[in-house]
Amino acid sequence: MPRKVWTQSILAGAVYNPLDGWDYEFAPWPGRLEMVHRASAVGLLSTVVSGSDRLQEEDPVPAGGTSGVTPTPFDSPALVDDFAARDRLKVSYRNPTGGTIVIDGYADITPV
């Protein structure tokens, strides 16, 4: 099961796309996406797309995490969706606040 883990400081006004360039950004087979993320402060917005399914669109990211600690489904809600072969998996974060926010997260994909 491939996993992509990220920790990134996002400056004020910046955008971060953790799955860009990942080997599985375009799914080689049908599968299931499970993604969990958590920010160090409130205000970060996320868009999550799995093929034609938009799971989040400019939604607030759960906050209160410790920078550098990968969140789990026990402390942050998981986003789960099935995707088809060749679907694009996309995660995008936008920081509209005046300060830097750290995002921690991961994406697991499992063939089905």
Image (spheres, rainbow, N blue to C red):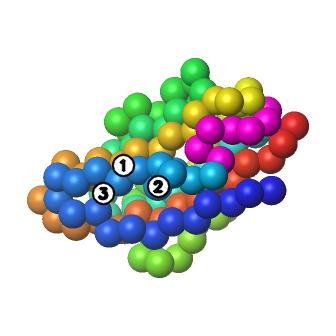
Q: What residue type is labelled 3?
A: Val
Foreground pick, 7 / 44? 7
Q: Residue at x 47, y 34 (%)?
A: 56
Where residue 5 sits: x, y (%)?
58, 65
Q: Which of marks 2 and 1 is nearer the N terminus?
A: 2
Where residue 102 sits: x, y (%)?
35, 68
Give the residue number, with chain letter if any, for mark 3: 42
- Mark 1 and mark 3: span between their CA atoms? 13 Å
Give the residue number, with chain letter if any, for mark 1: 93
Q: Which of marks 3 and 2 is nearer the N terminus?
A: 2
> Does the residue at mark 2 contact the one at mark 1 (Cβ under 8 Å)?
yes
Magenta stretch bounds: 24-30
State the SS at label 2. Answer: loop
Give the residue number, with chain letter if any, for mark 2: 18
On screen, residue 55 versus residue 112, left or right, reads left
Q: Which residue is drawn at 74% across and 30% down?
A: 85
State the SS at label 3. Answer: loop
Q: Residue at x 22, y 54 (%)?
A: 14
On screen, residue 86 versus residue 90, left or right, reads right
Q: Which amino acid does label 1 sit on?
A: Tyr
Q: Is residue 4 visible?
A: yes
Q: Earlier in the sequence, mark 1 or mark 3?
A: 3
